[in-house]
Amino acid sequence: MKQPDPVLPPANDDADGTAPRATSPGKPQFPKETYLQWYEQMQLMRKFEDKAGQLYGQQKIKGFCHLYIGQEACVAGAVSALEKGDKWITAYRDHAHPLALGTSPNAIMAELFAKATGCSKGKGGSMHMFDKEVNFVGGHGIVGGQVPMGAGLAFAEKYNKTGKLCICYMGDGAVRQGALHEAFNMAMLWKLPVIFVVENNGYAMGTSVQRTSNVTELFHIGRGYDMPSEPVNGMNVEDIHDAVARAAERARAGEGPTFLEFKTYRYKGHSMSDPAKYRTKEELEDYRSRDAIEQVRHTILTHNMATEEELTVIDEKIKAQVQESVEFAENSPYPTADELYKDVYVQQDYPYIRD
């Protein structure tokens, strides 16, 4: 079957040229508990983001808001492959990462509402989520700005001999930034324990990769630095887990960084203000037919890991969590005026904040 107007070539094509569908999973590669964990994590991301989109439409969430709907496997598969204590950093499409790492949905929703109970005390909003407790180091609004920071986090882990690593996410638009190339060069030179991930959803802010670069297979960029690099089907959580696990093994063995291109797809526009008219409805539906959550759900049911009723219990639990987060955010206070000058510097009595 020919894919209509493809933004990305189908990852892991079958021999006849058709992409794997959510209705035909192979033999399970992982224990039942892993599939159930993936299902619950990805459903939480999806339902949370669905609700965030609704609340934005109601103007309860303001400012910028970039949803992760469709890309959930890119985080869920990495969480299961890494260890507690590893550092995480990403760009501004950043709600799903802390959710999967264990940050309370209440704290994330409150941050979207700019409330004092948010994970960044209401000062960061949608684009600047942080949670030190789960080693999530942001949420960064400057395109590509987090890439050298990810290398720096990895440098600290190597310097302190912790045995931990940093996974650094970016969008496909960020690979054009010079900071990425500088960071790649130093990361390879110093063999830093960092996994660089480009979530290639095909359109950056709204312009396809094919229209912005002669190099459309983005993983080749890493090979210019002799960095082990590979493409990964970003719509398949099993493939994500395997690729990240291999990269983590290299990093912990002192062999340096890896560059992974997660070929994924966002179902919404770049942000809530983007109508996404640069793609067709047929293309969107084609990618929806490969939905990662439905693939995992089908695997669970086909191989008797859980019943429909048991998955419904999970769905209802998530629905209640999301609703609780909304109520928590609505009932929380806004930051007070004296918070304006706090958390600017580590030194509490820094003398030059105000004249």
Image (tube, rainbow, N blue to C red):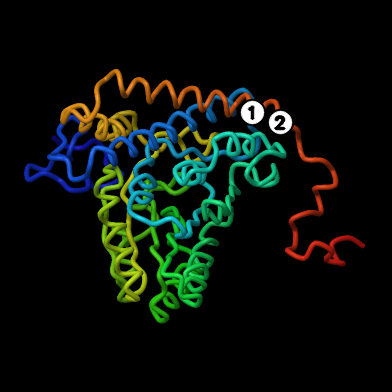
The quarter of the picture where the C terminus appears is bottom right
Where does label 2 land, which residue? Answer: 332
**SS for tag 2?**
loop
Outermost residue to the right: 355
Residue 214's label in the rendered image is none
Q: Is residue 80 above or below residue 159?
A: above
Residue found at x 45% / y 28%: 47
| Front residue of this view, candidates 291 and 256 | 256
User: Secondary structure beneath disc 1?
Assistant: helix
Instruction: Tell me: residue 58, above or below residue 349.
Output: above
Where does residue 52 sit, x and y in percent of width and height?
Answer: 54, 30
Estimate the spatial distance between the alpha carbons at disc 2 and disc 1, rounded to whole Å. 6 Å
Q: Position of residue 83 (x, y in %)?
A: 39, 57
- The kind of residue on which mark 2 rests is Ser
Residue 255, quarter of the rendered image: bottom left
Whether residue 296 sits left or right of residue 178 in the image: it is left
In the rendered image, the vertical position of residue 52 relative to residue 30, given as above or below:
above
Are the residues tagged 2 and 1 within 8 Å (C-beta)? Answer: yes
Q: Amino acid at mark 1?
A: Phe
Q: Position of residue 279 (x, y in %)?
A: 37, 36
Q: Residue at x 65, y 47 (%)?
A: 120
Residue at far bottom of view: 189
Residue 20 falls left or right of residue 236: left
Q: Residue at x 38, y 25 (%)?
A: 314
The part of the image, by quadrant, that contains residue 163 is: bottom left
Number of other residues with Cα within 10 Å of mark 2, as a class: few under 14, some 14 to 19, many 20 or more: some
Give the label on residue 328, or none. 1
Residue 223 x %, y %: 30, 71
* Residue situated in front as seen by the camera: 320 or 56: 320
Residue at the far left in the pictured view: 15
In front: 286, or 33? 33
Relative to 309, 126 lies left or right: right
